[in-house]
Amino acid sequence: MSNLLHVCIYNTEAQSSQELQTQVSALNFVRIVAEVGSPDAFAKVLNNAAVNLVFFHLDPNIAEVVEMIEHVSTKYPELALIAISHQTDPEAILAPMRAGCDQFVCEPIEHNDLVNAVARVANRRMLSNTKSRCICVVGAGGGAGTTSIACNLALEIGNLTDRDCALIDLDLQFGDVALNFDCEPRYTIHDLAESGNELDRAVLSTTVTTMSCKVALLSRPESIEQCEAITPEVIHRVLELMTVVYENVVVDLPGRFDIQTIAAMGQADLILILCQLNVPNLRNAKRFYETLIRMGVPDERIEIVVNRSDGRSGRVTEADVVATVKKPVFATIPNDYQFVARSIDFGTPIASQDRNSPVRSAIRKMARKIVVEPVAKPVVKEERKGIFSRFLSK
């Protein structure tokens, strides 16, 4: 699931364009894909862009726009539709609702009215219907094994679901996800950033490197200088499109809070914090978890994974993790450093080295918990509305 909404505005009244653009742009986590004023242009946008919310400006000809609403609601039942008009008589409000609109907003537009309307349709239609998962993997310290876990988790999810799992390297400066697959991608996330408003499914399909192991890789930029182009907005757009195209998206993150990392975690359905059984990792895992909670990330979207556990009772144990972070351990990956290091050096996934490896078995078990046996508790409608409204309102 992603909190970014891709919006199209259907408006045939030129003098209203600037006000509509201003009001909709003032909503946080919203990106305007296009404003169109003709059926042909509208059809082109709906067929080629990842749109999930449409604003219909009814004026000046309500009957014509209502006819368009009826057509769109029939052909694209998954879209959320909101009508906007200066007309406030009962028939002007009822007609678009009968045609398939979810909400009606009166002009002049009050910001809070618009926020509430979008939050309601997002809760009822988009958030509840989504089947995609965005899984962020982040380490509680240097050398936590984040990239290896992210790569092999994506592979196991792909095999379990029998569908390509997207894998994004967001360690923008020094990420080595491609190295784990002995792969040299022709394109990177920088190419998506350079595509600007042209970014759509067609561009994505030519940029992602799809491998036979059911992993679709989006690599980090080639040069450090190119990292500047990967803004939070780019990350929002890329993750939004990825979660439309792929059922599961795994993101390898660096172990720090920067604007790119925060942008990715804000769109995650699940954040896996990798922690080794040592005091620095334990303290960092606690700080990471508490920071995410303060940022407003729901507790059920955060899990602790113990990596490189040797199974012996040392100075720091899993019980210490639970007592310190005050959260159960989601998964435990056993320690086999030499085996995993060999896998990385040869650029072959763990399953290719040894399908019966205890490390591979533990990662596969974790993947099964994520995609086959979901553990996230349902969020009641009132909670979701509050969270989504806060995201939308600047």
Image (tube, grey):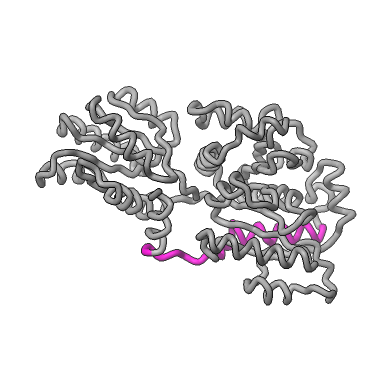
Residue 227 in the image: above or below residue 334 = above
Residue depicted at x 62% and y 28%: 191
Q: Position of residue 186 (x, y in %)?
A: 70, 27
User: Could you tell me if residue 245 is visible in this image?
Assistant: no
Is 10 part of what is drawn in magenta?
no
Q: Position of residue 22 (x, y in %)?
A: 33, 36
Residue 65 shown left or right of residue 33 in the figure? left
Q: Tell which residue pokes out farthest to the right in this image.
A: 338
- Residue 342 appears anywhere in the view: yes
The correct choice, above or below, for 365 with respect to 93 in the image is below
- Residue at 82% from the left image edge and 71% from the top image edge: 311
Query: Does residue 53 appear to the left or right of 289 in the view shown?
Result: left
Name the quadrant containing residue 213. top right
Decide which of 183, 5 is in the foreground and name it. Answer: 5
Main secondary structure of the magenta stretch: helix
Q: Position of residue 234 (x, y in %)?
A: 55, 37
Highlighted range, magenta: 357-382
